[in-house]
């Protein structure tokens, strides 16, 4: 018994010695693909409240995955924060994340917006919707993603490339709803209704609508907020010419996605990482995200900003985000077969 106690003391002393640096100067290392000012504001607030410093390393989404993979067990990364469930799925399937069990997180985040076993958690939410020109399209003509295949939309749709993860996740949701053959056919018909081969990002699709080249664009909701609040007056004008339509309200709901984060497999500051994720899903942090970023909070008891709320309430597709990742490979295959560049 005595020997056992000594052993325990020795090992806890050893552990304390190893973590001495992080106990004196607690920190958490965050690898982030997000590039918003609001994020830094939240990390500063977290430091004020907990004394834990958030070191942020920013890079492209694929670059961050590659980096964590190459660093292996020596990676200083504690958290990977990225956009789109498809990427979070990829990180998990590469073995870069570890499951976290936190009652705070499971109570704050609806189950469809987090990994079933806790490998990652949605922090903010966005919807992929139809942006239409207010003068050239009557919203009564719109209904579902499926209806966009109608020949009346020929040459009128602006949408970005199929290499984009937002489109891949939308396609995954259509595969989940109808099976891959029907989804492939859907993609083929959308291609034939495009006004040109896909080019640019969601913002550029809205600009094409404003320029009169197309009448509809498929975009993530927050892009409208970004355009309306842009320093570039042309972007503001483009944003003012369009309105958002939330498809599939009478069936499964509008396709949504998250930006989210997971604790890395070898996180050296795991407890601090969990604390940061819990903070980011608190009412306080969710309110800050909502007010400054035109995204929807994941918490159901936090309101979106006034602008975002003005786009209206909508029913969302409550498919588990993880399934979108599972269907990603099939989505890419069907896109290729359909000739969606
Ligand atoms: Fe985006």
Image (tube, rainbow, N blue to C red):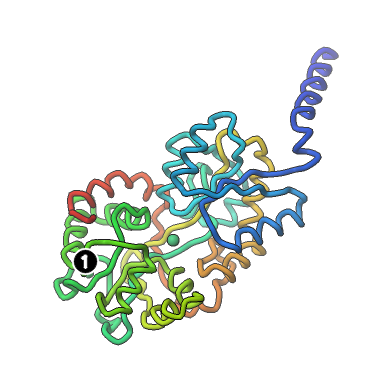
Q: Is residue 24 above or below residue 240?
A: above
Residue occupying the point 20% across, 63% down: 190
Displayed quadrant of residue 201: bottom left
Q: Relative to residue 69, is residue 319 drawn left or right?
A: left
Q: What is the x, y in percent for residue 23?
A: 78, 38
Q: Relative to residue 33, is residue 281 drawn left or right?
A: right
Is residue 300 visible to us here? yes
Displayed quadrant of residue 301: bottom right
Is residue 249 visible to us here? no
Residue marked by disc 1? 196
Residue occupying the point 81% across, 40% down: 24
Q: What is the x, y in percent for residue 114?
A: 50, 51
Q: Relative to residue 332, is residue 69 drawn left or right?
A: right
Q: What is the x, y in percent for residue 284?
A: 67, 64
Where the N terminus falls, by quadrant? Answer: top right
Q: Relative to residue 272, is residue 182 drawn left or right?
A: left
Query: Which element type, helix, strand or loop, lies under badge 1?
Result: loop
Where the C terminus falls, by quadrant? Answer: bottom left
Query: Crowdedness of circle 1 by 10 Å Cα count: few (<14), some, many (20+)?
Result: some
Q: Residue furthest top?
A: 3
> Along the line of sight, which residue is nearer the eye, 7 or 130?
130
Residue occupying the point 47% across, 57% down: 258
Q: What is the x, y in percent for residue 159?
A: 29, 65
Beta carbon of the mark 1 residue lies under 8 A of ligand 1: no
Q: Quadrant of ligand 1?
A: bottom left
Displayed quadrant of residue 153: bottom left
Q: Residue furthest left?
A: 151
């Amino acid at each position: 018994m005595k020997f056992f106690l000594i052993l325990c003391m020795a090992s806890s002393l050893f552990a304390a010695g190893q973590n001495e640096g992080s106990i004196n100067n607690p920190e958490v290392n965050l690898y982030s693909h997000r590039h918003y000012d609001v994020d830094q504001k939240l990390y500063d607030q977290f430091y004020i409240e907990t004394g834990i410093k958030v070191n942020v390393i920013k890079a492209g989404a694929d670059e961050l995955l590659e980096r964590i993979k190459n660093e292996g067990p020596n990676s200083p990364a504690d958290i990977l924060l990225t956009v789109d469930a498809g990427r979070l799925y990829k990180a998990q399937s590469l073995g870069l994340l570890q499951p976290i069990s936190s009652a705070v997180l499971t109570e704050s985040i609806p189950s469809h917006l987090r990994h079933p076993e806790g490998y990652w958690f949605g922090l903010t939410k966005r919807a992929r919707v139809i942006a239409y020109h207010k003068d050239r399209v009557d919203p009564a003509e719109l209904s579902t993603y499926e209806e966009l295949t109608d020949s009346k939309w020929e040459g009128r749709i602006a949408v970005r490339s199929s290499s984009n993860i937002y489109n891949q996740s939308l396609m995954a949701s259509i595969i989940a709803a109808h099976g891959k053959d029907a989804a492939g056919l859907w993609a083929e018909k959308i291609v034939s209704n495009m006004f040109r081969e896909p080019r640019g990002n969601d913002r550029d699709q809205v600009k094409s609508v404003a320029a009169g080249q197309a009448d509809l664009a498929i975009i993530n909701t927050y892009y409208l907020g970004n355009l309306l609040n842009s320093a570039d007056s042309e972007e503001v004008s483009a944003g003012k010419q369009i309105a958002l339509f939330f498809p599939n309200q009478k069936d499964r709901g509008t396709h949504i996605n998250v930006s989210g984060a997971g604790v890395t497999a070898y996180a050296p500051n795991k407890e601090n990482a969990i604390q940061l994720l819990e903070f980011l899903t608190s009412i306080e942090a969710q309110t800050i995200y909502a007010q400054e970023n035109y995204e929807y909070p994941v918490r159901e008891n936090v309101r979106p900003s006034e602008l975002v709320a003005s786009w209206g309430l909508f029913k969302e597709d409550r498919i588990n985000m993880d399934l979108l990742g599972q269907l990603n490979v099939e989505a890419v295959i069907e896109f290729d077969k359909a000739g969606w560049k």
